[in-house]
Image (tube, helix red, strand yellow):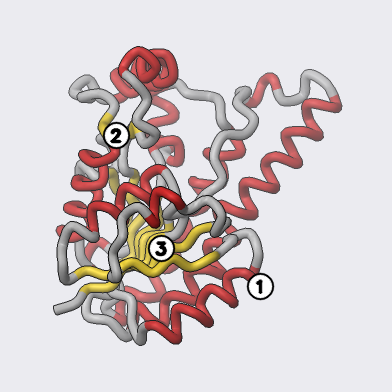
């Protein structure tokens, strides 16, 4: 039986890794959305007639509308939608530093609104477009890609004060996951926010991994003494897909790591 996936933000990172992993199964097809069709060389290199690349800038309602006009012509259902597209990076200071000057405060406010708009509000418009296709499918799963930085427990125990705009927006997404779960559980739709863990999604060499991820690894080890380190994209995507296959409607609305709990990043 053909299983259909929607993956947003599919041109890089965890989104691209998921597309590659999903298409390893010959009965799977993927609708991969990207913000810019001029930046899809890695996707096109997959060379599969089961891969459909569609433009979708999730910060634009018009772009989302146009995207789903195309998708609705190609399929009547989506078994599993994985909403991976997100704004990354941003202001890195902790709250105590945000009012050092009026300029830094204004920069923070603008940054925070941008992140909240893309990573939380836009996900509502996007999810509402795909939910009718999910409801028409066999598996009926809506997955938001989250992060350990959206976890209150992780923030407290790892003592991580930075990345406030990104953390805010992803924490809002986790609550949005619970809200959708509350509305859709009785329809048999599984809604989850899943953290894929710490991933070397750009295949940096090991010496760069230690530099780039060093502070985050140290914090993760404080939070979870059994933390095994940064995963390759392939390893992370396998675990992510295994997790969303395992969890069903009973768990709808929960925030989980791909290791199977909200406290194991």
For this view, does 231 lie left or right of residue 43?
left
Between 164 and 243, the residue placed more toward the observer is 243
Q: Which mark is residue 62?
A: 1
Between 51 and 141, the residue placed more toward the observer is 51
Q: Which mark is residue 27?
A: none
Which quadrant is home to the C terminus? top left
For this view, does 63 lie left or right of residue 76?
right
Between 194 and 61, the residue placed more toward the observer is 61
Q: Residue at x 26, y 78 (%)?
A: 188
Q: CA distance from mark 1 to mark 2?
A: 36 Å
Q: CA distance from mark 2 to mark 3?
A: 27 Å
Choose top left, top right, bottom left or bottom right for residue 159. Answer: top left
Q: CA distance from mark 1 to mark 3?
A: 18 Å
- Tell me residue 64's x, y (percent): 57, 70
Mark sitting earlier along the chain (1/2)? 1
Disc number lying in front (1 or 2): 1
Mark sitting earlier along the chain (1/3)? 3
Q: Residue at x 20, y 52 (%)?
A: 243
Q: Are marks 2 and 3 in contact (CB under 8 Å)?
A: no
Disc number lying in front (2 or 3): 3
Element carrying mark 2: loop
Q: Which mark is residue 265?
A: 2
- Tell me residue 163's x, y (percent): 56, 30
- Tell me residue 135's x, y (percent): 34, 82
Q: Is 63 placed above or below 168 here?
A: below
Mark 3, other Cα within 10 Å: few <14 / some 14–19 / many ≥20: many
Q: Which mark is residue 32?
A: 3
Q: Is 184 placed above or below 42 here?
A: below
């Amino acid at each position: 039986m053909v299983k259909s996936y929607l993956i947003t933000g599919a041109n890089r990172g965890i989104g691209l890794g998921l597309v590659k992993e999903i298409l390893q199964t010959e009965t799977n097809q993927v609708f991969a959305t990207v913000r810019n069709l001029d930046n899809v060389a890695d996707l096109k290199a997959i060379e599969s007639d089961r891969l459909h690349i569609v433009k979708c800038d999730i910060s634009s309602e018009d772009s989302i509308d146009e995207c789903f006009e195309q998708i609705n012509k190609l399929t009547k259902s989506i078994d599993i939608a994985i909403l991976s597209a997100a704004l990354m990076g941003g202001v890195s200071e902790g709250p105590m530093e945000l009012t050092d000057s009026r300029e830094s405060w204004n920069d923070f406010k603008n940054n925070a609104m941008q992140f909240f708009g893309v990573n939380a509000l836009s996900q509502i418009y996007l999810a509402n477009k795909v939910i009718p296709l999910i409801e028409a499918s066999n598996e009926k799963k809506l997955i938001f890609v989250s992060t350990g930085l959206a976890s209150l427990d992780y923030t407290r125990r790892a003592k991580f004060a930075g990345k406030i705009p990104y953390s805010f927006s992803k924490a809002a997404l986790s609550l949005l996951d619970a809200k959708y779960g509350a509305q859709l559980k009785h329809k048999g739709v599984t809604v989850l926010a899943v953290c894929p863990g710490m991933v070397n999604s750009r295949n940096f060499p090991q010496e760069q991994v230690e530099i780039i991820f060093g502070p985050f690894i140290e914090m993760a080890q404080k939070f979870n003494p059994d933390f095994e380190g940064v995963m390759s994209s392939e390893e992370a995507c396998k675990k992510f897909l295994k997790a969303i296959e395992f969890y069903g409607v009973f768990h709808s609305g929960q925030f989980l790591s791909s290791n199977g709990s909200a406290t194991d990043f």
